[in-house]
Image: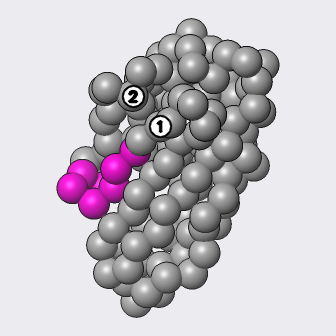
Amino acid sequence: QVQLVESGGGLVQAGGSLRLSCAASGRTFSTTGMGWFRQAPGKEREFVAAISVSGDNSHTTDSVKGRFTMSRDNAKNAVYLQMNSLKPEDTAVYYCAGSRDGTYSKYDYFYHYWGQGTQVTVSS
């Protein structure tokens, strides 16, 4: 079992940056594939980024390519999402997710563990 807690959200102007963190508890974090998803008001939850167990491989959705970078530190049981050049359309609640079989998919049904979310608001 892995528990996830996100932090680092807030209000930022367009063009600014934020770094989200996700702290994980549990002995199996180093074998857990990790992802970030987001949900804007009135919209479905969507994939943002995911990273492999080792951290050597990651992928992001097209709308954030070149602006967002996901990383992980297995020694600290944490994953991060560095968000640069933020746009108002990035406004959403951001969720950290974990997959116990190591999958790092863009599909949310592959993930077994979810955090409570952190709000990111980008003003124009």
Real-space Cα distance between discs 2 and 1? 6 Å
116 over 123 or under it: above or below = above
User: In this view of the protein, can residue 46 be seen by the observer?
Assistant: no
Corner quadrant of residue 31: top right
Residue underneath mark 2 = 55
Query: What's under tag 2, amino acid-wise?
Result: Gly
Which residue is depicted at the point 54% across and 29% down? 74
- Which stretch appears magenta? 64-70
Q: Tell whether 79 sits left or right of 24.
A: left
Q: What SS does tag 1 mark?
A: strand
Residue density around tag 1, few if under 14, some if 14–19, many if 20 or more, within 10 Å: many
Please, is residue 90 above or below residue 105 in the view? below
In x, y percent, where is residue 105? Answer: 43, 25
Residue 60 magenta: no
Which image quarter is the C terminus in?
bottom left
Q: Which residue is mark 1?
A: 72
Res 13 → quadrant: bottom left
Q: Which residue is at the front of the view, 84 or 54?
A: 54
Q: Residue at x 46, y 20 (%)?
A: 53
Q: Circles 2 and 1: CB distance less than 8 Å?
A: yes
Which residue lies most toward the left here? 66
Determine whether, in the image, residue 90 is placed left or right of residue 115: left
Q: Is residue 122 visible?
A: yes
Relative image position of residue 5 (x, y in whole percent): 73, 46
Instruction: Tell me where residue 84 sits by quadrant.
Output: bottom left
- Front-lying residue, 76 or 113: 76
Q: Residues within 10 Å of mark 2 (few under 14, many from 20)?
A: some
Dot placed on the residue nearer the N-terminal end, 2 or 1: 2
Q: Secondary structure at mark 2?
A: loop
Of the 4 image quadrants, the one containing the N terminus is top right
Amino acid on which disc 1 is placed: Arg
